[in-house]
Amino acid sequence: MAVAFATGARQGPGGASLGVVSGRRRQGKSFLLQALTEATGGLYFAATEATEAESLRLFTEALTRYTREVVSIPFRDWNDAIAYLFRAFRGRPVPVVIDGFPFLSKVSPTLPSIIQRELGPGGSGGESDARLVLCGSAMSVMGGLLSGNAPLRGRAGLELVVQPFRYRDAAQFWGINDPRLAILVHAIVGGTPAYRYEFTQGDAPEGIADFDPWVIRTVLNPQKPLFREARYLLAEETDIRDPALYHSVLAAIASGNITNGGIANYIGRKSDQITHPLNVLEDSALIAREPDLFRAGRVRYRIVEPLITFYQAVMRRRWAELEIHRAEKAWTSLRQTFLAQVVGPHFEALCRNFAVESGEALYGNFPAEVGSGVVNDPAGRCQIEIDVAALDAEDHGRPRRILSLGEVKWGETMGHHHVERLRRARDLLALKGYDTRETLLACYGGSGFTEELRASAADDRHILLVDPERLYPPLFSVEGGSRSLK
């Protein structure tokens, strides 16, 4: 898509085009855009944290090197620079990439308005063939460029968010062929490409027995870039003015306090006092707000970047020890916390991803919504947690179909009582008006299933069992070896 935008003829009226590329840091945006400009003969300019005057000087030098037309003095301001930029690219579509755009807009807040004016009627972009691409990692800034009443809203012909690798692609990228090891590694580094080589120097665990040593020698090693990366991810967001508050909010979520009230209680604030920090973290794509599928108006929060969860739940608690190279001792005592507070919730998220990606094959229909929720059981005076719920699209006039209800357990062998709990939830939802006649009852077991449950699943097409091997088909043929992390 980006190549077609950068090199293709514009449909409709001629003139310059605008594209916006964003994504969290370390996803490979700069690498891809540099490769694009090299392959197509375009211009790549990487902005840095600098004053407006210095940024203009650096931009002038980049244009001079590219056009080989000497600009006698640096541009007076961005009005001159953007006008010159569009006039310099005529004759064929050429990508012009400005990377690190949030650095420029921070010190020159009028820059988006200047670009908008030059792209509009009578502007210098009218006769230009430039394909201007603005790129940045500050998600709150980049997301705001095209939203609401922002000057550039409606101007972009390309809006591309570079996402991390999906969990199966990440396992391939790391060269891991054991599903349980793939889940453990993904629970720490997620699908961020840069962590594979640049941040670990190519060090990947050789097997499940090497996982603990790998954590100690890479993520918990003060001499490795991964050690402080989670802190930098937060510090790089320009809208975060009180780091201590935001770290506490993230620590609350990593500790299992995933509702507004739970987070507020954990950090000692009132619920209305954390609305703004939650909104900022969401705009920064560091957390996600996920609705409870069975209780209107209820939401839960989830940290999007696994490394931040690992830092908040594990590293931050023993930071002083880790800094003086006592990782082995600290990891021994924190390992169980990692499994409970990091791997368990992360495995749930992977299972929801599995339901999305495999939905049509599993349910015969692609699910309209996949998430989690709580079903109230008044008779039992309890609440039934549904970790993976898949719902069909709403069809007005008909009960909404529930495609699947699922429970997830990482460190517990699943048995009949888990299915019975799901059956109870299914029956309660049927009483509320949902269509549950063909609902699959899914058990997602990180530590497997009892023989009795396997036998029942073989005879009952409404019972679905998903283990790590099924989560990663058919990449893996797991060979023996220790599976001590349960």
Image (spheres, rainbow, N blue to C red):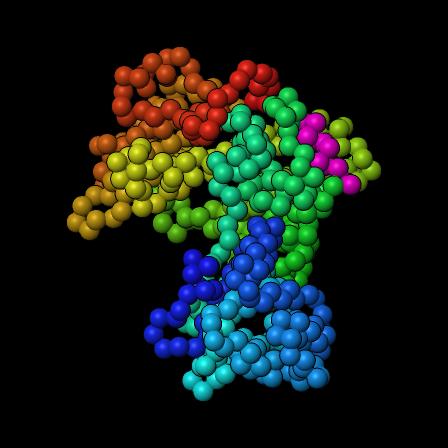
- From what the image shows, is residue 67 above or below residue 334? below
View extreme (right): residue: 324
Image location (x, y in percent) of residue 222: 77, 40
Which residue shows up at 36% across the image and 36% down it? Answer: 358
Q: Quadrant of residue 77?
A: bottom right
Q: Is residue 273 visible?
A: no
Image location (x, y in percent) of residue 69: 64, 79
The one nearer the camera, 398 or 429, is 398
Q: Quadrant of residue 43?
A: bottom right
Which residue shows up at 73% across the image and 33% down it? Answer: 217
**Side of 318 where 191 appears, left or right:** left
**Quadrant assignment for the C terminus:** top right
Q: Is residue 222 magenta?
A: yes
The one nearer the camera, 63 or 68, is 68
Which residue shows up at 54% across the image and 31% down it? Answer: 183
- In the image, the segment drawn in magenta is 212-223
View extreme (bottom): residue: 122
**Side of 465 where 80 appears, left or right:** right
Q: How many marks?
A: 0
The one nearer the camera, 130 or 243, is 130
View extreme (left): residue: 397
Q: Is residue 485 magenta?
A: no
- From what the image shows, is residue 294 above or below residue 363? below
Image location (x, y in percent) of residue 385: 42, 35
**Quadrant assignment for the N terminus:** bottom left
**Side of 236 where 283 appears, left or right:** left
The one nearer the camera, 79 or 442, is 79
Q: Is residue 438 visible?
A: yes
Image location (x, y in percent) of residue 345: 52, 36
Which residue shows up at 56% across the image and 41% down it? Answer: 190
Q: Quadrant of residue 365?
A: top left
